[in-house]
Image: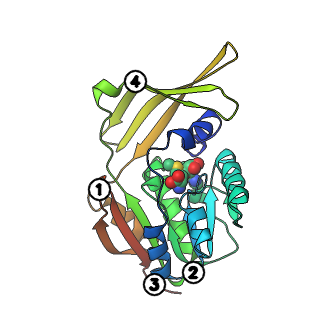
């Protein structure tokens, strides 16, 4: 399965019930107010913080590769009475009609891009979609290995149809040279005496010191600041076009 399709089917179904923390809109609202509108959230998923930003009246569009996550986002928007424009696209193949003063990812979603080649394509897309003077915000982290005692531990939630949904870590491989961690997750759906099981690879990719800055430069972007965000080992990079044509 392509990593961009990971959040589909049962994974999308389990995403909201098992979400440990929702991305609060306030930090991203502050970023959008500072950088300007319109704004674009890449990897908006089922709508956090996108819908919160729309409720604040900010002009923010969303992009995600998963039709299932976007369907949930549109449903939540209707339930909340907010209008939202979302596009089903991969961030490494962005092709949108608008240009944006602010482009951001909420949390380290950029780490889901599985290698430097895909990341460079995404950074080129970001560069291409920035309005003159616009700023991009990319949070990144270096994932830790899953602690041994968590391998095999099952987390459960109920689906909308009453099914029992279960997820557990089966195994994990870390490739320090490629800077990737691949976690095999087992998803189970139990309903009416029947059980279906799927295993999915969840890939995280990270950057060596200076590596992200070099990729950004190759995409025509300059890092204007890099700051540790509160908690979780996440570093937030702000990028601007290196030159304007
Ligand atoms: C961890 S979820 C975050 C969703 C939402 N922003 C939130 O905080 O709840 C990551 C999202 O990124 C999307 N995604 C992963 N790879 C992508 C890609 N290459 N292009 C666009 N979206 C992608 C997934 O489909 C998923 O909805």
- Kindly report which numbered mark, 2 or 4, lies closer to the viewer in this rendering: 4
C-alpha span from label 1 to label 4: 24 Å
Residue with the mark numbered 3: 243
Residue 220 seen in this snapshot: no
10 Å crowding of disc 2: few (<14), some (14-19), many (20+): some
The kind of secondary structure element at disc 3 is loop
Q: Classify mark 3 as within 8 Å of ligand 1 or not, answering yes or no.
A: no
Label 3 or label 2, whichever comes before in sequence order: 2
Mark 4 or mark 1, which is nearer the start of the sequence? 4
* Residue beneath the point at 72% across and 52% down: 75
Counting residues from the N terminus, which is met first, the one under dot 4 or under dot 3?
Answer: 4
Q: Considering only vertical position in the picture, is 237 above or below 93?
A: below
Residue 41, position in %: x, y?
56, 65
Quarter of the rendering containing residue 14: top right
Query: Which mark is nearer the camera, 4 or 3?
Result: 4
Q: Residue at x 57, y 65 (%)?
A: 52
Q: CA distance from mark 3 to mark 2?
A: 20 Å
Mark-to-mark CA distance, 4 and 3: 50 Å
Q: Which residue is mark 2?
A: 37
Pointer 4: what residue? Answer: 153
**In front of the other: label 3 or label 2?**
2
Judging by the rendered image, the residue that carries numbered circle 1 is: 231
Q: How is the image coloured?
A: rainbow
């Amino acid at each position: 399965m392509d990593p961009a399709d990971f959040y589909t089917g049962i994974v999308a179904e389990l995403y909201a019930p098992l979400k440990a923390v929702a991305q609060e809109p306030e930090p991203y609202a502050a970023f959008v107010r500072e950088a300007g509108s319109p704004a674009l959230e890449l990897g908006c998923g089922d709508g956090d913080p996108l819908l919160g930003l729309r409720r604040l009246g900010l002009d923010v569009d969303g992009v995600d590769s998963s039709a299932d996550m976007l369907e949930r986002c549109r449903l939540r928007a209707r339930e909340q009475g907010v209008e939202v424009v979302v596009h089903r696209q991969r961030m490494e193949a962005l092709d949108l009609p608008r240009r944006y003063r602010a482009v951001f990812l909420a949390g380290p979603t950029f780490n889901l891009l599985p290698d430097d080649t895909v990341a460079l394509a995404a950074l080129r897309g970001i560069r291409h979609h920035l309005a003159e003077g616009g700023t991009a915000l990319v949070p990144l982290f270096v994932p830790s290995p899953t602690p041994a005692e968590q391998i095999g531990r099952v987390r459960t939630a109920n689906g909308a149809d009453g099914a029992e949904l279960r997820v557990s870590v089966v195994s994990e491989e870390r490739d320090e040279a490629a800077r990737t961690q691949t976690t095999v997750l087992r998803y189970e759906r139990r309903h009416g005496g029947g059980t279906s099981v799927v295993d999915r690879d969840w890939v995280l990719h990270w950057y060596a010191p200076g590596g992200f800055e070099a990729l950004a430069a190759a995409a025509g972007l300059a890092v204007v600041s890099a700051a540790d965000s509160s908690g979780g080992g996440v570093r937030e990079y702000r990028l601007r076009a290196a030159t304007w044509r």
